[in-house]
Each structure stands twice: as structure tokens, then as C-alpha cells.
Image (cartoon, rainbow, N blue to C red):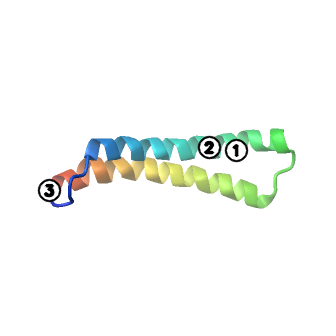
Amino acid sequence: MGRYGDLDYSKLTRRGFALGVGLLVVGLLGEALGPAVVGSMPAWGHTLFLDLEILGIVVGLFAPLTFGIALPLTE
């Protein structure tokens, strides 16, 4: 057994990247289609979708670095 238990790094890498892409897509679609569907969006709606975009980029970049590179090297 490894240092961090029985982690499947490839699965965690793929799922983390997919989560990041999903957050980014939801943020982009919400920002683009939100005003067309709802009309005038409040400021918190724009902030929410912008935060989803930023969080999606961060998660999408750091999941492969963490689970695909850093943790397997420390085993």
C-alpha cells in the first residue's frame, strides 16, 4: 500500500479535470445565455458565473498537477 492509501491517481486526475471543465462550461454558458433567458441579470448572477469560470480554470489546472504529477512522485 502506498503512502496515501490506495488512491487511483489516473481516475482522480481525469475526474478533477472534468470537474474543472464542467465548472468552466457552466460559468461560460450562464454568462452568455443567462441574460437571453432571464433578461436582466442581477450583479450577484454575473459574479457567480465569473467565479465558476475562475474556479473551473483553477481546478482544471491543479487537478492534473496534483494527482497526475505531485502525488505519484511522493509515493
Q: Report the quarter where the C terminus lies.
A: bottom left
Label 2, secondary structure: give it. helix
Q: CA distance from mark 1 to mark 2?
A: 6 Å
3 and 2 marks in contact (CB < 8 Å): no
Query: Do the CB atoms of the residues marked 1 and 2 lie less than 8 Å apart?
Result: yes
Q: Residues within 10 Å of mark 2 (few under 14, many from 20)?
A: some
Question: What residue appears at the point 16 percent right and 58 percent down from the top-left corner?
Answer: 74
Helix, strand, or loop for circle 3?
loop
Image quarter in which the N terminus is found: bottom left
Instruction: Tell me which residue sits at (41%, 47%) in the image.
Output: 16
Residue beneath label 3, please?
2
Q: Amino acid at mark 1?
A: Gly
Give how far apart the Cα atoms at labels 3 and 2 are: 36 Å
Q: Amino acid at mark 2?
A: Val
Q: Nearer the viewer, residue 55 or 13?
A: 13
Task: Kindly state the secondary structure of the residue where label 1 is placed.
Answer: helix
Above or below, comparing residue 51 to residue 26 in the picture: below
Residue 11 quadrant: top left
- Relative image position of residue 73 (x, y in whole percent): 17, 53
Looking at the rendering, which quadrant does residue 33 occupy?
Answer: top right
Label pair 3/1, CB-CB below 8 angstroms: no
Please give the label number shown on residue 26: 2
